[in-house]
Amino acid sequence: MSSPTRKARYIMIGGFLGAGKTTAVAQLAQRLSNDGLRVGLITNDQGSELVDTAMLRARGFATEEIPGGCFCCRFSSLSEAAQRLTAASAPEVFIAEPVGSCTDLVATVSYPLRRLYGDHFTISPFSVLVDPIRASRIFGLEGGGSFSSKVLYIYQKQLEEADVIVIGKTDLIDESRRKELRAILESHYPHAQILTASPRTKAGLDEWFERITSNEQQPRSAMAIDYEVYAEGEALLGWLNATVHLTSNSTFEPNPLLQLLAADVQTRLGSSEIAHFKMTISPATGLSDIAAISVVRNDIVPELSLTLEAPLSGAQLIINLRAEAAPEVLQSVIKDAIRALPSKVPGLRAEIEHLEFFRPGKPMPTHRIAEPLAGS
């Protein structure tokens, strides 16, 4: 990178799968754009064909996607993505959304960026979002499905390295539960600032966004982490991405189709714990509008976050499914659900064009800086 005339701000928003990172990233990007700032977004995943990228691009944001591994293992790809965005639109703020199953991002991403590209970036405090229902179950405030201990190791390490922990989706819980959850997080992670916010209602966003756009991350010793347990935890999660071409003799309604398919997949998964299940439908005409649906727990009713107003005769369906199950199980579930679609939507034809299913490999960071120099 050539030396810039002015540093760009680098903001990373992490959190476990289903925490609401993409919604928060879109809200922050819109806020900064409204303030007249140029914004570039970087999404990340173990696979390709991301719902998150499609959703952010549909909202008009310049977005680069880094597939095939976490930011920590694709550090050169992260810097190259920033260069491409710089060449295209010269962003004043970069917002990066890492993979929801990754941790140790401060030592392997934030500190190396500061050390290697400190002339180019101001590094903001690292935020980690939590879904309040998932967190309440993990910390024993309510019953319900959860993950095995090695997957929870990743979840807890994400919180341990956060500068700011944001209890998101606060519209889903009452004030009493918010106070309980906040008290538990404060006792477990005393170094972090605990905030509450609801991207849906925009409550609490001002305080959070002010914190991460006006301050710089303060160096401290990186947390200790057992990469063997981390790798074993990631390997327990099955990963599936698919792209499906939809056509019809007449037309079909995209919004109820997403709801039908999401509910069917939930049923077929049975007791396999869903980490995050997302789908989008976009018109085959190439228009930027999309419909989107998200499922973040087994017992949640699938909810549309974006809708399409007009029926379609052709479309592209993108599916991202992450769950604690064998990848082969996820493949079978999705194939069976896609095959069953024409019986639920008369006249519909569904052809799988892209399908990948796997377990994430062992994380092998490009850099790891555990003791950053002050001001480095």
Image: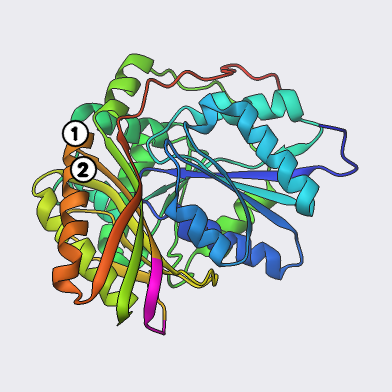
Residue 350's place in the image compared with 140, above or below, is below
Kindly identify the amino acid type of the residue bearing the numbered disc 1. Answer: Ala
Q: Name which residue lies at 75% across and 29% down.
A: 117
| Residue stretch rendered in magenta on the structure | 309-315
Q: Name which residue lies at 34% across and 23% down.
A: 230
Kindly identify the amino acid type of the residue bearing the numbered disc 2. Answer: Leu
Count neighbours of disc 1 (C-alpha within 10 A) and say few if under 14, some if 14 to 19, many if 20 or more.
some
Give the numbered dot on residue 326: 1
**Left or right position of 343 against 275:** left
Which residue is at the front of the view, 358 or 368? 358
The percent position of residue 105, horizontal first and vertical second, equals 51, 30
- The type of colouring in the image is rainbow
Give the numbered dot on residue 112: none
Residue underneath mark 2:
330
Which residue is at the front of the view, 245 or 177? 245
Which residue is at the front of the view, 89 or 156? 89
